[in-house]
């Protein structure tokens, strides 16, 4: 088989587009270096629009209304850089709030709110927060955001945890609930303690709604919540 058999011109346009659309963005960049025709395809709006819509579904409709919009590839690259900067800000914020490898729930929820305000999509979280080199509490922020804000199916989140090799990383949750009333007297505040893997949280294997406790924070009967990295001492309490 000679070299001409591999040229883009021998592939129908719809097939070439199908091939390109199945690739990751980093692979697309490599593909654009193969030849001029592949580079032309790499710049095609019909390729980048669905990539943008898949990665940023919350922003897609707003982009369509933007009078200064000039093309999907350039906008995708610009948005990726902005998301990377925002992720770095969230990472620095969480690391700054850490106290002895733990974080208070209000700061934790602020980090999730920052992701929501910037329109983070599932792909953003996968690429920028579900990474083994980051603190597990940042992994937890990404997991919680995907499940509770983006409503990503648990099976998809579990697959992302698995592919990132972080599914077995563990966190510890402590929370205090307002004591119940019994014949006119309020009982002592209740203390709860759980150590769970990220996979357990995503699959709802825990017998208590830990993510629900994190979401409520100090609202209703939950008085205080503390989230920490699992240590040997934590395991002794579990």
Image (spheres, helix red, strand yellow):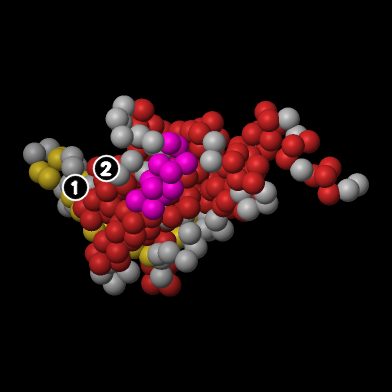
The part of the chain drawn in magenta is: 71-82
The tally of labels here is 2
Residue 87 appears at what percent x and percent y? Answer: 35, 55
Q: Please identify the residue farthest to the left as the structure is shown.
A: 184
Task: Give the residue at mark 2.
Answer: 117
* Rendered view: 120 above or below 93: above
* Residue at x 47% of width, y 45% of height: 123
Where residue 185 appears, as percent x and y from the top left, is 10, 43
Determine the image quadrant of residue 100: bottom left
- Point 41% across, 70% down: residue: 231
Quarter of the view holding residue 135 = bottom left
Q: On the rendered image, what quadrant is the C terminus found in? A: bottom left
The residue identified by callout 1 is 218
Question: Is 196 positioned to the left or the right of 20 in the image?
Answer: left
Name the front one of labels 2 and 1.
2
Magenta: predominant secondary structure element? helix
Q: Position of residue 138 (x, y in %)?
A: 38, 58
Asked if residue 203 is among those painted magenta in the image, a careful observer would answer no
| Of 92 and 166, the residue lying toward us | 92
């Amino acid at each position: 088989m000679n070299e001409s058999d591999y040229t883009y011109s021998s592939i129908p346009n719809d097939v070439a587009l199908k091939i390109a659309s199945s690739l990751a963005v980093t692979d697309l960049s490599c593909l654009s270096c193969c030849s001029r025709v592949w580079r032309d395809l790499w710049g095609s709006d019909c390729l980048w629009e669905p990539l943008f819509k898949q990665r940023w579904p919350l922003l897609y409709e707003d982009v369509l209304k933007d009078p200064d919009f000039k093309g999907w590839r350039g906008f995708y690259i610009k948005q990726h850089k902005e998301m990377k900067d925002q992720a770095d800000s969230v990472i620095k914020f969480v690391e700054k709030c850490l106290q002895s490898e733990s974080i208070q729930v209000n700061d934790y929820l602020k980090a999730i709110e920052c992701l929501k305000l910037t329109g983070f999509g599932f792909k953003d979280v996968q690429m920028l927060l579900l990474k083994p080199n980051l603190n597990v509490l940042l992994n937890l922020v990404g997991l919680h955001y995907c499940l509770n804000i983006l409503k990503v199916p648990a099976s998809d989140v579990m697959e992302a945890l698995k592919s990132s090799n972080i599914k077995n990383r563990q966190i510890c949750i402590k929370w205090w609930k307002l004591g119940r009333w019994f014949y006119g007297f309020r009982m002592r505040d209740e203390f709860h303690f759980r150590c769970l893997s990220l996979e357990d949280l995503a699959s709802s294997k825990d017998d208590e709604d830990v993510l629900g406790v994190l979401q409520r924070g100090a609202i209703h009967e939950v008085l205080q919540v503390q989230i920490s990295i699992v240590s040997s001492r934590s395991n002794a309490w579990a």
